[in-house]
Image: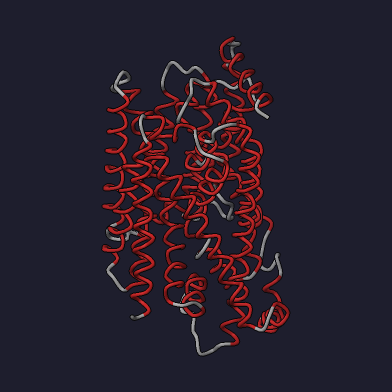
Amino acid sequence: MSNETYQLIAIVFYLAAMLWIGWYAYKKTQNLTDYMLGGRSLGPAVTALSAGAADMSGWLLMGLPGGIYVTGLADAWIAIGLTIGAYCNWFFVAPRLRSYTQVANDSITIPSYLENRFHDTTKLLRIVSGIVILIFFTFYVSSGMVSGGVFFESSFDVSYQTGLLIVGGVVVAYTLFGGFLAVSYTDFLQGLMMLIALLLVPALAVFQTGGPAETIHTIRAIDPTLFDLFKGTTFLGIVSAMAWGLGYFGQPHIIVRFMAISTVKEIKSARRIGMSWMIFSLIGTILTAFIGIAFFEKHPEFTLNNPEAVFLTLGQILFHPLIAGFLLAAVLAAIMSTISSQLIVTSSALVEDLYKVLLRKDGSDKEYVFLGRLAVLAVSVIAAILAFEQDNTILNLVAYAWAGFGGSFGPVILLSLFWRKMTNWGALAGMVSGAVTVILWANLTEAGVIPFQLYEIVPGFIINLFFSIVVSLITYKHNDKIEKAFNESVALIKNDK
């Protein structure tokens, strides 16, 4: 058999496994809470790895190693910022959000939590946050499908559109039928695949470069500044890179995992598993890039056409084609895990936060689950249409989608969990001002109106925080029910430790 045939066998096996998990989760999905939040039944390992896989996407296996391969360790500031942000998210947000969403009328989405947390009778907070999620994630899902299409086009010489339809079809199938449980279980498996792949490739490659000491010597001979963490950096550049960590507090597809874990007590175990996964994966990514530099220097018979393909190219050179196929599947897993997570959150925003609020609040669970599945299909079709011509403007939006969610939801989530005097009007003002600031800042910077480069999440986060606090102080009125729920959420954490 040819190398490509072996790799296709591995990919088909992986895709079949995803579909089987979707069928298994379908059998366990009985009501809307099961479909949207897995019945709050996730264990610490599934919670941790599904959150990590939903977060990292193809950036972990392609974008970051490609950047470090070209510029060296100076490109690792984003990874440092993300690691700090992820830890703070697990430590501060996870336990509070898990307990508060339970106390706040058993909220199963971020918009419903915000409405219940502030007793917002106007419905504005829930509707606006649902619309923000719907808009950003439709384009985010579209970008993931673009990545899937490009993956198949570059790996198996099939058309971009065919690859897009394969990825979209499989992800939609297991998400549509299995809901949150299918997404979480598949993300868990995909997270394991990503970690194993990122440890295997540098571990085997270093033997081909003469061992650790010889590898370091080779890299230093090429360019000693590759190990310089501050090479070519500026203060604002480092701030912008580190600020990626701020985005974690407002990413709906990540923090919804905190709401789904079975008990607050298990969050500590989940945090340790999740952070270990993240740190080992990032170390594997960095080592892959550096060992790749030495490998292609010592083995000129091999060429690397695209730095972002350093992981894939090393895998195909070093491993049997069947194993290389599973390494390819790890990249596909990174892409698909993020798409599925975004689809289920978008579906919940459509049904739980818009349809139920605006049209029909007294429907049956069976009706809502059916509509949730219909929403997954509808969003996927729209995303596929937007991605079908591989329009770069969709990918450009993703550059500030992370900032958009971080700037819109980050400060609001943090203040809602830790500040008793925050109000629904403060949350609404902060969310809208943060989102608008992110979008305006990104576009004004691109147009050259803002003369310096600063990642838009920084001004978006600050403006959100300012308006959330100021408007809350102006509109605050003591509410016994809100005060009682706040105290109950804190007590639940203490009692569950």
Q: State the residue at coordinates (57%, 44%).
A: 248
Residue 313 position within the rendered picture, expressed as x and y whole percent measured from the top left = 48, 76
Q: Position of residue 226 (x, y in %)?
A: 67, 73
Answer with the quarter of the image where residue 387 lies: bottom left
Whether residue 175 is visible to the viewer of this picture, yes or no, is yes
Question: For the point 39% across and 27% down, which residue is it?
Answer: 127
Q: Quadrant of residue 469?
A: top right
Quarter holding the C terminus is top right
Between 497 and 216, the one lying in front of the other is 497
- Residue 463 vs 86, above or below: the answer is above
Where in the figure is residue 18, as x and y percent of width and height? 38, 53
Q: Quadrant of the N terminus?
A: bottom left
Q: Is residue 237 visible?
A: no
What is the basis of the colouring in this image? secondary structure
Please indicate whether residue 327 sits to the left or right of residue 64 in the image.
left
Residue 301, above or below 66: below
Q: Choose between 10 and 455: the one closer to the eye.
A: 10
| Circle count | 0
The answer to whether 176 is drawn above or below residue 73 in the figure is above
Report the residue that reaches farthest toward the bottom: 301
Residue sitting nearer the eye, 211 or 152: 211
Identified at 64% across, 56% down, the residue is: 279
